[in-house]
Image (cartoon, rainbow, N blue to C red):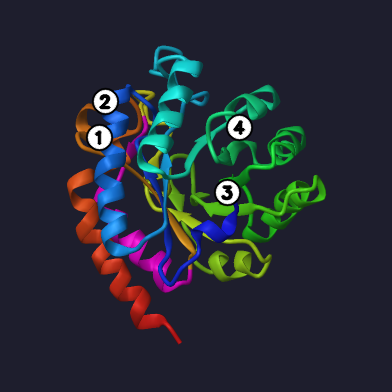
Amino acid sequence: MDLTNLKNDNFFLLAGPCVIEGEEMALRIADKIKTITDKLNIPYVFKGSYKKANRSRVDSFTGIGDEKALKILQKVGKTFGIPTVTDIHETNEAAMAAEYVDVLQIPAFLCRQTDLLIAAAKTGKIVNIKKGQFLAPNGMKFAAQKVVDSGNNNVIITDRGTSFGYSDLVVDFRGIPEMKEFGFPVVLDATHCLQKPNQASGVTGGQPQLIETMCKAGIATGVDGLFIETHFDPAHALSDGANMLPLDQLEGLMVKLIRIKEAIKE
């Protein structure tokens, strides 16, 4: 798979649960989203973390086991004929995860980790680099260049907001066209940009009621794709439920966004 698989007249979508909780839930979510995206002609990549390495508390849920979760991601891809994406956190995870998925994602906090970017690049997979909450948009050209200089031109840049104060994030939409000038597809993470990190309880909060607003703004400012974490029961999701989109709201949102995309075409 390369970036050409994600291109058509619509935006593309990276969507799925925050973390793989089990096989049944992953297949259920993928089936629903695939049905929607096929109907609306939206290129789709199933998203699921096989492990969460950046939890606030040591007792937070981190996963069901690396190999078990990766095999579920692989089964999702084969069952529905769709590419899959998962995040990696250390250099030794790159080659391992690449055996099971099509896109390797670099978490925002790790976007400056040179060895991690190089390891991901050398797998030959698409590398989706999330913009650090601490970086200006123009700083992402250097992260992307590390992947290119390692022999891999298949790069995606994803904005997930910028730190604002201690426990908030904002998206500066001026950064979307700025990052598009680097020549790589630019994605807006419309769920994580609404996180309320580092809450007093140690459990991340969020503003899911604003997901539609962020998606609309992203499409209007020219993003190539959207990243949305979604679950059929966010209140009982094992990770990041506070800022996930209820799965039953996804189709209606996609229909609205396609209308916006059509309206801004030159």
Please report contact status of discs 4 and 1: CB closer than 8 Å, yes or no: no
Residue at point 54% right, 52% down?
Answer: 158
Q: Nearer the viewer, residue 51 or 73?
A: 73
Q: Is residue 6 left or right of residue 40?
A: right
Disc 4 and disc 1: Cα gap in Å? 23 Å
Counting residues from the start of the chain, the first of labels 2 and 4 encountered is 2
Q: Which mark is residue 49?
A: none
Vertical side of 177 occupied by 169: above or below: above
Counting residues from the start of the chain, the first of labels 2 and 3 encountered is 3
Residue receiving disc 3: 1
Counting residues from the start of the chain, the first of labels 3 and 1 encountered is 3
Secondary structure character of the magenta stretch overall: helix
Number of other residues with Cα within 10 Å of mark 3, as a class: few under 14, some 14 to 19, many 20 or more:
few
Residue at point 25% right, 34% down?
Answer: 28
Residue receiving disc 4: 98
Type of amino acid under label 1: Arg
Q: Which mark is residue 28?
A: 1
Residue receiving disc 2: 24
Disc 3 and disc 4: Cα gap in Å? 12 Å
Number of other residues with Cα within 10 Å of mark 2, as a class: few under 14, some 14 to 19, many 20 or more:
few
Question: Is residue 51 something that shows in the picture?
Answer: no
* Secondary structure found at label 2: helix
Please report contact status of discs 3 and 4: CB closer than 8 Å, yes or no: no
* Secondary structure found at label 3: loop
Q: Is residue 61 left or right of residue 108?
A: left
Residue at point 42% right, 82% down?
Answer: 265
Q: Position of residue 193 (x, y in %)?
A: 42, 49
Q: Nearer the viewer, residue 96 or 61?
A: 96
